[in-house]
Image (spheres, rainbow, N blue to C red):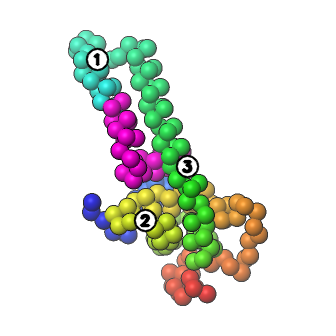
Amino acid sequence: MAELSLELLTEDAIRLMHREIDELYATLGVQLLACNPPTGASGIMSYLSAVRDASEKKSPSEAFPSAPALSEWVTGLGIIYEELVRQGARFLLEAREDLRKALRMEMNLHLPDQSRSAIQILILVVEEGLKIPRGFGPIAATVAVILHKRGLRNFLFQDGTEENSSDIIDLEEVVFEPSLLWR
């Protein structure tokens, strides 16, 4: 598996910013299929193969499936989508404390919208905090976008801890003065 550069991951993360949060969780769920036992991916592929096979067996005059078959396919695809959303959300729930620890240890972040350098730093912090293996950087990019969309302050302080404004670091400042990360 080829490792993507931070620049490419950042470009991809910025393109994901307009996606809805459920779409991002589903995207993360798809990415995580590579990290889970193969039976999960195999089940999805079996279903998609069955849909493909059923559509190929139709004669040209039956190019479009009947209403009941179409609704069954849509239902099946909906179930797959919802499971991928759950897998993505479950991953973040399980990784929440590691992410919070990494983000709090490094910095309390204030991310300006669409700042390339801020997204790059967030991707790196997520990779480090989750100890993501080489080649799995796209997972960190997706997690970074989800955290950004959910709001880092909400994520960091969900448990009711009070925010200390002296600990907040604007990532635009960090770009010009990296030593702010270690103050």
The secondary structure that most of the magenta stretch takes on is helix
Amino acid carrying mark 1 in the image: Ala
Instruction: Tell me the residue that label 1 is attached to.
Output: 63
Chain-order first, disc 3 or disc 2: 3
The answer to whether residue 175 shows anywhere in this view is yes
In the picture, the quarter occupied by the N terminus is bottom left
The residue nearer to you, when weighing 152 against 76, is 76
Q: Residue at x 28, y 17 (%)?
A: 63
Amino acid carrying mark 2 in the image: Ile
Occupied quadrant, residue 151:
bottom right
Which disc is residue 103 wearing?
none
Dot 1 surroundings within 10 Å: few (below 14), some, or many (20 or more)?
Answer: few
Region in magenta: 20-47
Instruction: Tell me the residue that label 3 is attached to.
Output: 89
Q: Residue at x 36, y 30 (%)?
A: 47
The answer to whether residue 149 shows anywhere in this view is no
Instruction: Tell me the residue that label 2 is attached to.
Output: 132
Residue 21 forms part of the magenta stretch: yes
Dot 3 surroundings within 10 Å: few (below 14), some, or many (20 or more)?
Answer: many
The residue nearer to you, when weighing 172 against 167, is 167
Chain-order first, disc 3 or disc 1: 1
Q: Secondary structure at mark 2?
A: loop
